[in-house]
Image (cartoon, grey):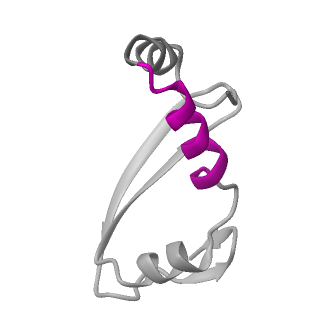
């Protein structure tokens, strides 16, 4: 299994026997880029939550809303 997911998730996956299913999900669905399906989905949204974390692990999340297309996909790793 990959190192993705929390310790609690891994404990529960082991308890219910879903480790292989979780590994397949992490390996095939957790991407470090936006694939074409994700990009199309984003363009149709009327609201988004923008979350960031700094080098200390401090997190912030902000809500944004607008008409479809207010979020633009610049490339496979960048939203505007």
Residue at image coords 59%, 80%: 36
Where does residue 35 sit, x and y in percent of width and height?
62, 72
Total marks placed: 0
Q: Quadrant of the N terminus?
A: top right
**On the image, which quarter does residue 26 sit in?**
top right
Q: Is residue 57 above or below residue 36?
A: above
Q: Judge whether 50 appears above or below 65 on screen.
A: above
In magenta stretch: residue 55: no
Q: Where does residue 23 sit, x and y in percent of width and height?
A: 60, 35
Give the residue drawn at x 62%, y 31%: 4
Q: Quadrant of the C terminus?
A: bottom right
What's the residue at 37%, 17% (across, down)? 16
Judged by its main secondary structure, the magenta piece is: helix
Residue 68 falls left or right of residue 24: left
- Image coordinates of residue 31 in percent, x first then y, are 65, 55
Q: Position of residue 19 (x, y in %)?
A: 53, 25
Magenta-highlighted residues: 17-30
For this rendering, which residue is in front, 56 or 69? 69
């Amino acid at each position: 299994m990959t190192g993705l997911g929390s310790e609690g998730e891994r404990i529960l996956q082991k308890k219910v026997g879903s480790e292989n299913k979780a590994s397949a999900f992490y390996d095939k669905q957790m991407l470090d880029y936006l694939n074409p399906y994700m990009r199309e989905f984003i363009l149709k949204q009327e609201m988004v939550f923008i979350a960031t974390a700094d080098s200390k692990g401090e997190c912030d999340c902000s809500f944004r809303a607008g008409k479809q297309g207010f979020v633009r996909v610049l490339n496979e790793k960048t939203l505007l």
